Amino acid sequence: MELSESVQRGLQLAAEPSSVDHRGFQALVDSCFRSLLSSQGDPAVLDEPELKHVDRIQLKQVHSAATTFILEAVKQDADKSAVSSSLEELSFSTERIEIFYSSYQKHKKELERLLASIGRSPARINDVSWRLQYNTKNGQLDKVNEPSYLISLNTENQGTSEDISFTCTTEQLQDLVGKLKDAAKSVEKASQM
Amino acid sequence: LLLDLLERHAFTEQVFCFSSVVEEFGHIALESLRRGSSPKIYESAAKKLFVPMEMVQHGVEGLVFLLMESSKHMISEVNFLDCVLVLGFSEEVNRFLLKLYQEHQGQIRTIMKQLICSQPTYQNLEWRLDVQLASRLLRQQIVPTVVTRLFLTSGTDSSSRVLQTDPRTLLHIIYTLEAALAAVKTSHTRRILRNIK
C-alpha cells in the first residue's frame, strides 16, 4: 500500500510503545474504527481514559493516520499479508499487528458497505404506499365507475426524501407489478450464476 | 340539457338541412374535440359551403356541446333521439347524429377523462439490472441494483424518472403492490362496486 509521509509518521508513532502504551493501543484502534463507523466527527472519540496520558497532538496525528490506513486497506481489499507487511515496514510489533488485524477483520464488511454507499446514484426507492379508490363521477363525466389506484413511491436521494405519486388503473398496476417481477426474476437468475 | 341545446342550436338549424353539410360539421367537431378548435378549419369549411364563418363556428360548437353532454351522461339511444328531435332536424340528420354519438362515445369519454387528471398517470416502466463493481472509494465490490425508468403522463405532458432499488426492497415493493391488486378482488370492494352504479 502506498502511504503518504504524514500517514507513515503517524503510524510510526502508534507503533512506538513509549508514545502509545499497550492498553492505549487497543483503545486507539477501537476508537479509530468507531469514529469511521458510528460516531461520525465526534471529538469525544479520543477521550477514552486509556488515552488520557498520550500527548494530545500526537494522538490526533496517530488517529488521522490510522483511519486513513484503515480506509485505504478496505478500499483495496487488503488481506492479512498485505496489512501485516505494511505495518511491519512501519516497525509495528507482531502483537500490535495482531490486535489491529483482528479489529480490521471484524469491521471490514461494515466498512465496505459504508464505502460502497458513497457516491452518486439515481434516487433510490425505499418504500411504496397505495390507496384503492372507486372513481364514480366528476365534473366532466358521469358514470365513470372504475377502480383506480393512487401509488406513492417513497424515494431518497443524498439524504433528501421525495414522494413520487401517480394514479393507475388495475390493468396498469398489473403491468407495473409484472415488470417488477420480471426484474426480480432476473436478479434471482443472476445470483445463481 | 335540452334547453341549453335549443339555445345553442338556434343558429344552426338552417345549416343542418343537408346531410352532407352535417357530415362535414361532424368531422370538424370530432377534430376539434381531439386537437382543439382552430379558426382556420372554420374558415375553409365556410368557403366550401358558401356560408359565413360564424355559422360554421356556432354549428360546430353546438355539435361539440351535444356530443360532450351526451357522452358525459352516457344517455341512451331513445334519450338522444328525444333531444335532437326537439331541434327539428330531418330524420336523416337525426340518424347521422345518433351514429356519430354512438361510434365516438368511448373516444370522447377518454378525451374528457384527461381533463380531470390532475395527477400524473402511470404509463410504462423500463428496468435494467446493474451490478456495481468498483468505485472511487471501494475497488472490489458486487452490489446488485435494479435501475428503473418510470414513465408518467399528465394530460398531454409525459415525463420520466430514473430510480433505483436493491433486490430486497424490490421484493418488498412487489409484495406490497400485490396486496393492492388483491384488494380490488375482496368481497368488501366487490360489494361497493356492485352497489354504486
Image (spheres, coloured by chain):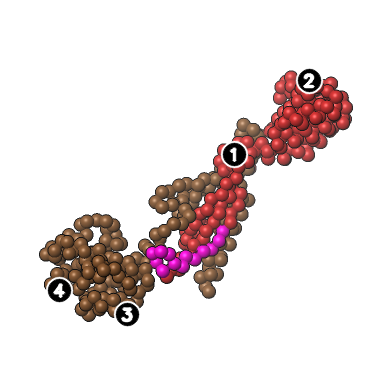
The image quarter containing residue B105 is top right
Query: Which residue is at 53% across, 74% downward?
Result: A193
Q: Amino acid at mark 2?
A: Phe
Name the residue that disc number 4 marks. Answer: A17
Q: Which is nearer the N-term, disc 1 or disc 2?
A: 2
Name the residue that disc number 1 marks. Answer: B117
Q: Nearer the viewer, residue B72 or B130?
A: B130
Q: Is residue A148 visible?
A: no
- For label 3, count other residues whose C-alpha is less than 10 Å away and answer few (under 14), some (14-19) or many (20+): few
Q: Amino acid at mark 4?
A: Pro
Q: Residue furthest left?
A: A53
Within the magenta stretch, is there residue B138? yes
* Residue B52 on image: x %, y %: 80, 22
Distance from Cα at disc 4 to Cα at disc 3 = 23 Å
Q: Chain of mark 4?
A: A
**Above/below status of A150 relative to B66:** below
Chain identifier, colour red: B
Q: Chain of mark 1?
A: B
Q: Are marks 1 and 4 in contact (CB under 8 Å)?
A: no
Start-end of magenta stretch: B127-139
- In the rendered structure, the answer to whether residue A107 lies left or right of residue A95 reads right
- Marker disc for residue B11: 2
* Residue B25 on image: x %, y %: 80, 30
Q: Which is nearer the N-term, disc 4 or disc 3?
A: 4
Name the residue that disc number 3 marks. Answer: A81
- Marker disc for residue B146: none
